Image (spheres, rainbow, N blue to C red):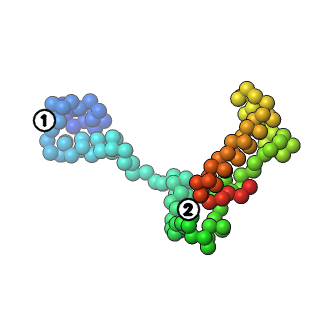
Amino acid sequence: MDGGDATPGQEAKVTEADVFNMSGDMLDRYLNWYHQTWSGERDSKATPVSERLRRVQSRLKVQKPISANDEQYVATINRPGAFYKRWQRDGDLSANERAFVAKTAENAGTTVNILIRTVYSLEQRLHDIASREGRPEVEH
């Protein structure tokens, strides 16, 4: 796109010197092309996923945070981990859980029983620490 050449499709070949020699119209066309090509802003329709996300997020409701000191509500709050299963022995596992734990034990280089006991022991220690620190209880 030589200083006087306005051939569409040649915008990528423009040099700094070419820009200084462009007329006002040519500069406008070049800047429009540059904006559409490189700005990251596309004039495209929303994808089904982004449209669905917009609809779902538009239905969200703001919730008032509940303090751990508000005893009226503390017992009714489902905290993270409240519904986690804690396995103590191999017999506590379903077939799918057993397959997962067996593969995990294999990857860790240990047995299923040792992995289950170790994880249970760690969970118990974390629960005890949280209890000592006065964090809300998580029932299992």
Q: First in sequence: mark 2 or mark 1?
A: 1
As helix, strand or loop, the secondary structure at mark 2 comes to helix
Image quadrant where one finds the C terminus: bottom right
Q: Identify residue for label 2.
A: 56
Disc 1 crowd rating (10 Å Cα; few below 14, some 14-19, many 20+) is few
Q: Contact, CB < 8 Å: mark 2 with mark 1?
A: no
How much space separates mark 2 and mark 1, taking CA atoms?
Answer: 51 Å
Q: Residue furthest front?
A: 132
Residue 132 position, x and y percent, is 62, 53
The residue nearer to you, when weighing 121 against 42, is: 121
Residue 93 visible to the viewer: no
Above or below: residue 86 compared with residue 12: below
Residue at 24% x, 43% y: name it.
31
On the rendered structure, is 66 left or right of 140? Answer: left
Label number found at residue 21 = 1
On the rendered structure, is 68 left or right of 44? Answer: right
Disc 2 crowd rating (10 Å Cα; few below 14, some 14-19, many 20+) is few
The residue nearer to you, when weighing 62 against 127, is: 127
Amino acid beneath label 1:
Asn
Q: Quadrant of residue 77?
A: bottom right
Residue at 65% x, 47% y: name it.
126
Judge depth for marks 2 and 1 and give the one in front. 2
Residue 38 position, x and y percent, is 33, 40
Amino acid beneath label 2:
Val
